[in-house]
């Protein structure tokens, strides 16, 4: 079946550092979404990408929809302690209303 | 962004009882809702896709008679865990699809429900 490979699995960084994580898929996606999940809560949508090559920012976060439609990355600049959490990429191959395929998540730890 | 609520946020029940979890889209209509299960330190596992007014589509390995899903309106889907057992203890999360045409559909997640079966 379709798989999403998300890396790295975990990251330990210092406050102020930049962070990059990415996802690759075995299939072509037409939507990429990036979520952040805090412990005991549901995922919160960070950035949604709908076109190949699209580069979108949300504050200190920047994400891109790969030109091959099989990958996406998320960058966080100047990390702060509240960036701690698990980041998930998710993609969809088909039309609206179909289920997302999730990556396994990247756990981010930020030390001050 | 769109808001999705879940109720209850946590529940503890005895083995053999049934538990109902509600998922509501508060400021948009969701033709499609999804139910996920998440184990500690793992990703979300899709259980079923719920479409308003029709039967839910269950993923392989998910017992439809155990996890009853009802999507009675465009803003409400319910998941009932029947005859719950300790192995059903987990974090259950719903999401609602904005269902916009084309590729701009986005899914928003509820805050999750922590189920503990004693």
Image: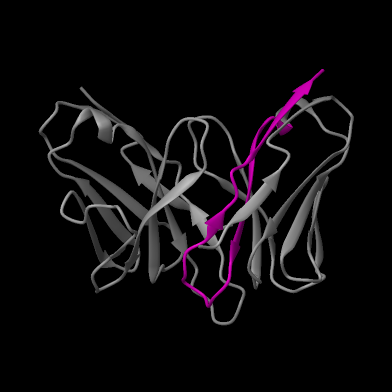
- Tell me which residue sits at (78%, 71%) in the image: A68
Residue A65 drawn above or below residue A51: above
Q: Quadrant of the C terminus of chain A?
A: top right
Residue B60 image position (x, y, % from top left): 33, 58
- The structure's colour scheme is one colour
Tell me if A44 is positioned left or right of B98 in this view: right
Residue A87 image position (x, y, % from top left): 65, 42
Residue A53 drawn above or below residue A44: below
Furthest-bottom residue in this view? B102
- Tell me which residue sits at (85%, 25%) in the image: A15
From the viewer's side, name the closer residue of A2 and A39: A2
Residue B7 image position (x, y, % from top left): 32, 42
Determine which quarter of the picture holds residue B106: bottom right
In reply to whether residue B118 is colored magenta, the answer given is no
Tell me if A19 is positioned left or right of A104 in this view: right
Find the magenta span and give its range. A83-112
Does residue B27 show up? no
Does residue A32 show up? yes
In reply to whether residue A84 is colored magenta, the answer given is yes
- Tell me which residue sits at (29%, 49%) in the image: B22
Determine which quarter of the picture holds residue B118: top left
Tell me if A8 is positioned left or right of A88 in this view: right
Residue A39 image position (x, y, % from top left): 53, 29
Total numbered badges shown on the rendered structure: 0
Tell me if B80 is positioned left or right of B17 in this view: right
- Tell me which residue sits at (87%, 41%) in the image: A77
Residue B31 drawn above or below residue A4: below
């Amino acid at each position: 079946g379709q798989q999403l490979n998300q890396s790295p699995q975990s990251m330990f960084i210092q406050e102020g550092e930049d962070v990059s994580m990415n996802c690759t898929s075995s299939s072509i996606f037409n939507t990429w979404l990036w979520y952040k999940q805090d412990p005991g809560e549901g995922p919160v949508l960070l950035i949604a990408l709908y076109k190949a090559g699209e580069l979108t920012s949300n504050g200190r976060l920047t994400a891109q929809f790969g030109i091959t439609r099989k990958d996406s990355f998320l960058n966080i600049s100047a990390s702060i302690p509240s960036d701690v959490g698990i980041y998930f990429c998710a993609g969809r191959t088909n039309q609206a209303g179909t289920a997302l395929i999730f990556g396994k998540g990247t756990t981010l730890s930020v030390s001050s | 962004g769109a808001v999705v609520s879940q109720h209850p946020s946590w529940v503890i029940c005895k083995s053999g009882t049934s538990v109902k979890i509600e998922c509501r889209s508060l400021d948009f209509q969701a033709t499609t809702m999804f139910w996920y299960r998440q184990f500690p330190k793992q990703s979300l596992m899709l259980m079923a896709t719920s479409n308003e007014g029709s039967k839910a589509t269950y993923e392989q390995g998910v017992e439809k008679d155990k996890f009853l899903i009802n999507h009675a309106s465009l803003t409400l889907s319910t998941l009932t865990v029947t005859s719950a057992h300790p192995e059903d203890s987990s974090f259950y999360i719903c999401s609602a699809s904005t269902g916009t045409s084309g590729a701009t559909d986005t899914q928003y997640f509820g805050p999750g429900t922590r189920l503990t079966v004693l």
